[in-house]
Image (cartoon, rainbow, N blue to C red):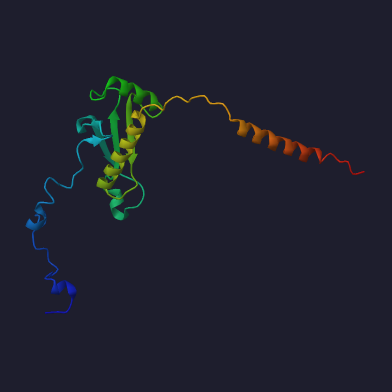
Amino acid sequence: MDGHPARRAGLTGRAPYPIGVVAPELAERCVGHTGAMPDDLQVSARLVVPASELAERFSRSSGPGGQGVNTADTRVELSYDVEASPTLPAYLQERMLERLAGRLVDGVITVVASEHRTQLANRKAARERLGRLLRDASAPPAPPRRATRPTRGSKERRLTTKRRRGETKRGRSGGWD
């Protein structure tokens, strides 16, 4: 037998199973995995957008890709109709419509991803981007600011530096004739 480590390990360079068939020792780790994108979009722990409410469009992307750039539809546009969504509670829908007002077109938010060379990677990027946008838009508002008064120490420090600055400026008034 050859001294190459791969050959000593019993690897001959050929796949032991036909393409698409999972080795039995890996089967339990691959249950349910098809290589496709997950259907529903998990926005937060309590908010899930069903796949039926998402619309994907594919088109040709500019940028890297060699010969395939002219034939492969790798650019992804992912759209979600916030205004007509039946799964969003009313208070959350209002909040999202208000916060996303600048990005909505007829109540629909669209995210585009074309930075990767593969459609699957762009689909994943678009889903992450849309999830982040919806998560930020659905976040509860920040608590109102409580008015506070400046401390005595901060007032004294401010006045001390103000006095010092005034003395510096007074020293500049040309008394050297």
To which quarter of the image does residue 137 belong? Answer: top left
Judged from this view, the residue extending furthest toward the right is 177
Residue for point 28% across, 39% down: 127
Residue 148 vertical position relative to residue 19 in the rendered view, above or below: above
Q: Position of residue 99 (x, y in %)?
A: 39, 26
Judged from this view, the residue extending furthest toward the top is 90
Judged from this view, the residue extending furthest toward the left is 24
In this view, the residue in front, 115 or 28, is 28
Q: Which quarter of the rendering shows the N terminus?
A: bottom left
Q: Position of residue 47 (x, y in %)?
A: 26, 31
In this view, the residue in front, 25 or 11, is 25
Residue for point 21% across, 42% down: 37
To which quarter of the image does residue 177 belong? Answer: top right
Q: Position of residue 128 (x, y in %)?
A: 30, 40
In this view, the residue in front, 16 or 105, is 16
Residue 132 vertical position relative to residue 28 in the rendered view, above or below: above
Q: Is residue 91 left or right of residue 168?
A: left
Q: Is residue 129 left or right of residue 151?
A: left
To which quarter of the image does residue 83 belong? Answer: top left
Residue 13 vertical position relative to residue 64 in the rendered view, above or below: below
Q: Position of residue 65 (x, y in %)?
A: 31, 53
Q: How many marks?
A: 0
Q: Is residue 5 left or right of residue 58?
A: left
Can residue 23 be seen?
Answer: no
Residue for point 14% across, 79% down: 2
Q: Is residue 153 left or right of residue 120?
A: right
Residue 148 vertical position relative to residue 36 in the rendered view, above or below: above
